[in-house]
Image (spheres, rainbow, N blue to C red):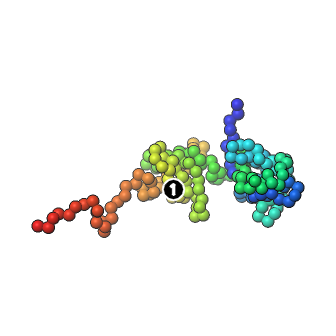
Amino acid sequence: MSAKPKLIVVAQIAGAFGVKGEVRVRSFTDDPEACFAYGPLMDAAGKVVLTPVRHRTLNDLFGVTAKEQRQREEWEAMRGTLLHADRASLPAAGEGEFYVSDLIGMRVVHLDGRELGAVKSVQNFGAGELIEVQPPSGSAYLLPFTEEIFPELDIPAGLLRAAPDEALLPEAPTRPDPARPDPTRTAPKPG
């Protein structure tokens, strides 16, 4: 029995194109045409969805002729489907570079030795990458993916060393504001 390949999202189906069974595809790779060089493109479960035979540029999308023969309506029904490539088919990362998806599952350890958790996901909502950390217990939390917060990355060892401000950690104690009265404190009766 073969191991399930590690899948990486490289593109998305944007709908049907024309009347000859082509499909429109939006590429997410740095070199937009590179997504067609990674072999068959699969869904999240690893089932082959599209094997590119030919592609052509359509503004910011591509018109793709696929080995799989589907009707226009079938491609339209698949609009929004994320297309994955086997991680093993991608080229090796350059010196000092890595694939963001390779961070998933890595241990996150504070510089002082505390186990903070494991990388659950990497998010980007427009202001830079955020590492979602799943602690050994409790809810996941986000840390900005910066050199200041993550000064050491050991990709081969599967380890991210972190130095976040304590306020970013879920166990961070909240400090009382001396300017605000403590609502749980009782005042002495006037005498």
Closer to the camera, 176 or 116? Answer: 176
The furthest residue to the right: 20
SS at badge 1: strand
Expressed as whole percent of the image width and height from the top left, the position of residue 40 reads 78, 46
For label 1, the crowd category at 10 Å Cα-Cα, with few meaning under 14, some 14 to 19 and many 20 or more, is some
In the image, what residue occupies the spot 48% across and 49% down?
A: 139
The furthest residue to the left: 191
Q: Report the amino acid beneath label 1.
A: Leu
| Res 26 quadrant in image | bottom right
Q: State left or right for residue 146 relative to residue 60.
A: left
Q: State left or right for residue 92 relative to residue 148.
A: right
Closer to the camera, 7 or 22? Answer: 22
Expressed as whole percent of the image width and height from the top left, the position of residue 4 reads 68, 38
Can residue 99 be seen here? The reply is yes
In the image, what residue occupies the spot 70% across and 33% down?
A: 2
Q: Quadrant of the C terminus?
A: bottom left
The furthest residue to the top: 1
Closer to the camera, 84 or 30? Answer: 84
In the image, what residue occupies the spot 80% across and 57% down?
A: 16
Q: Quadrant of the N terminus?
A: top right
Can residue 161 be seen here? The reply is no
Expressed as whole percent of the image width and height from the top left, the position of residue 78 reads 75, 53
Expressed as whole percent of the image width and height from the top left, the position of residue 28 reads 71, 57
Task: Give the labeled residue for mark 1.
Answer: 143
